[in-house]
Every structure is written in C-alpha cells, then in structure tokens.
Amino acid sequence: MKHWPSSILSIALLTAGIFTGSLSVAPEAQAQAGTRVFELRTYTSHEGKLDDVVARFRNHTTKLFEKHGITNIGYWVPREQPNTLVYLIAHSSRDVANKSWDAFRKDPDWIAARTASEVNGPIVAKVQSVFMDPTNFSGLK
C-alpha cells in the first residue's frame, strides 16, 4: 500500500466504518471466520475527466457490479486529491471476486458503457486495487 496516500486510505476506511485505530494490524488480529473480502480501488482520471468517470459509475458501473455479485459499499472523491475517485466494494470471497471481475469485463453492457464514455478519448489514467480482510473487531465484515 506504499503507493496509496495514507489520507485517502484512512478516509475511506473511516467512512466505511472498518477502521478504528492504526493501519498496522497484527496478523493474529485478522478475522478468521468468514471469507468476505473487501476491495479498495482508486481511479485517477485524465485531467478534466473526473466528472465523466463519476458519471460512468453513477449511471452504469454500480448497477453492473451488483449484476455480477459485487457489493457496492461506498464511493468518495478526495478533496486533496484532484482527478481521483476512491471506492470500496465487497465480494463473498477472493475466488468469487476474480470470477465477478471476469464476468463484468466481458459484459456487453459494460463494454457499451465504457465505449460510450470514452467517445472523446480515455477517461481513466490509472487504477489501483487493494484486497483487504476485515479484522476481528471491524464493524463491517
């Protein structure tokens, strides 16, 4: 996670209700029960294209996530990080996450939405993804 600005990660985790202390959590504190996994993603848009990225998520992507078994948790635009969308989603397991992403990427509705949103050129410059397991004291599991 060294590439993630700590303020963005902290804000996302605080807002989601899954962060109650230090970012350093001992392995033994990780939740053992259940396999639900969370994915924190950061999209950096091309200059001036953040509104297009947000519109694509609002109008298409979130619905398609649900269609493919991806649970939408929350979406944020950091105040101090221009051209950035941060969001948190959940999957029932890491294996299911991989299958959901594969199905999503092949979905004709996604391909059409992506193509239409990029009619004036690409809108996303960079995507970062971190898979996380909730701790045993997390309010969100």
Image: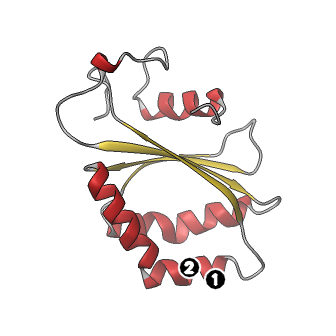
Question: Where residue 103 appears, x then y in whole percent?
Answer: 36, 72
Helix, strand or loop at disc 2? helix
Instruction: State which quarter of the image contains the C terminus.
Output: top left
Front residue of this view, candidates 108 and 94: 94
Q: Residue, x 26% and y 49% (percent of image)?
A: 93
The residue lying at 27 percent from left, 57 percent from top is: 96
User: What's the residue type where badge 2 is placed?
Assistant: Ala
- Figure coloring: secondary structure
Q: Is residue 26 left or right of residue 62?
A: left
Q: For mark 2, does the 10 Å Cα neighbourhood hold few (<14), some (14 to 19), or many (20 or more) residues?
A: some
Q: Nearer the viewer, residue 131 or 112?
A: 131
Q: Is 114 situated left or right of 108 in this image?
A: right
- Residue drawn 66% across and 32% down? 5
How many numbered marks have been drawn onto this rendered protein structure? 2
* Image vertical order of residue 119 relative to residue 128, above or below: below
User: Foreground residue, 119 or 106?
Assistant: 106
Tell me if label 1 and label 2 are in contact, CB under 8 Å.
Answer: yes
**Residue 80, image quadrant:** top right
Specify whether 45 is left or right of 67: right
Determine whether 105 is above or below 90 in the image: below
Where residue 67 sits in the image (x, y, percent)?
A: 33, 70
Q: The residue tagged with tag 1: helix, strand or loop?
A: helix
Mark carried by residue 74: none
- Give the CA separation, mark 1 to mark 2: 5 Å
Callout 1, which amino acid?
Answer: Ala
Q: Give the labeled residue for mark 2.
A: 113
Residue 55: horizontal and vertical position, in percent? 62, 66
Q: Which mark is residue 116?
A: 1
Image-quadrant location for residue 78: top right
